[in-house]
Image (cartoon, rainbow, N blue to C red):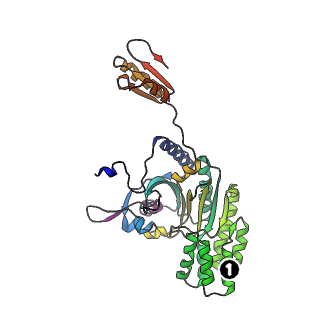
Amino acid sequence: MSRLFMFEKPLGMRDTLPELYETKSQVRSAIGEEMKAWGYQFIETPALEYYETVGSASAILDQQLFKLLDSQGHTLVLRPDMTAPIARVAASKLLKEDLPLRLAYSANVYRAQQREGGRPAEFEQIGVECIADDTVSADAEMIALMISTLRKAGIEDFKISVGHIGFVKELFVQILGTEERANALTKFLYEKNYVGYREHVKSLSLSSIDKQRLLEFLKLRGGEEVIEWALKLIENEKGEENIQELKQLWDVIVDYGVQSKLKFDLTLISHMSYYTGIVFEVYANQVGFPIGNGGRYNLLLQKFGKTTGATGFALRLDRLLEALGTLTKRKPAGCILFSEERRKEAVNLAKEKRESGERVVLQDINGVKSIDSYTEQYEEVTFLVGKAGRGSL
């Protein structure tokens, strides 16, 4: 390999150094334990999946997939998300009883980035999927559990925005007439280009009333009052049913007592095309991107031969750590410096300390260049050298 790349990493890949690794481990553990407390069971799936199944079902853009060929010539992908692989497993092996599945995961996913993007191509998601439960209670459970896990991770300053993909689709198709025209307008929402949205609406061949309805749609953000505003805009039964789902969701969230963390934003659109109903994103502190998102996907499992609804959410561990703002300092370890003739004594002492829960480093004195560097790095340094008794600094 050229020396030019000796210390470089592939675009979007990152190293995790000790303090960051320790922080991630503690946060991951706290979140995982909370998910287990809510009855979710952890599952693992392979990093490599078939392009024709999980790759195409993932809703990640084709140019963002890492592809390779196996020895038989089949196209494989590094998993770009976890929802599609878990849908595959659930449909093929787990959906055999008339009981909802509650599954959890913590895994790295891979999405190729453009050079100017500056975003990670490999990052860790930790999340849950509730499969074969079509109730609004399940959607509310996702939001309540997300709130609970964030608090367990040490984050309190956050808000969750909630929308409904079905409502947006019904409103736009009703006014614009075709899904193609609706999708063209929806793109502005996905890009959060509200200026472009307004200009596009003004350019459409619509009545002034319908144009006003589309412009008023951008105001559907806030608390419970948004539900009534939305009902005034929609004029078909399916759209009204979608809004009633949001009303039911709010009532359940009130029962959980976490409504202060929730706001409605009916302009919310996800880049994951498999979402069909209630969707949500969570923002924390001054992080510029969502640290987590989720929603209902009632059609995804059909791609794997099962007809059932599902909902879930995923947290981005890197962004979650950014919201925390501080890294965990490693608990200072003790260090035992020993000479050859007292090695066994040092080994036994280290074993004794480790069994009592202490962190201990064993170091042969012959490999030490500077005693001062050891006394600065470790909280306690014990010397077992020569034939004298035990000493410590």
Residue 92 or residue 268, whichever sits in front: 268
Q: Determine the residue positioned at 42% across, 54% down.
A: 13
The part of the image, by quadrant, that contains residue 108 is: bottom left
Left or right placement of residue 3 versus residue 290 in this view? left
- Check residue 101 for magenta coloring: no
Outermost residue toward the top in this view: 388
Q: Which residue is mark 1?
A: 213
> Percent position (x, y) of residue 305?
43, 69
Q: Is residue 238 above or below residue 162?
A: below
Residue 61 or residue 308, whichever sits in front: 61
Left or right placement of residue 39 versus residue 84 in this view? right
Residue 263 or residue 336, whichever sits in front: 336
> Percent position (x, y) of residue 75?
32, 65
Q: Residue type at mark 1?
A: Arg
The part of the image, by quadrant, that contains residue 383 is: top left
> Percent position (x, y) of residue 20?
49, 44
Which residues are the magenta region? 71-94
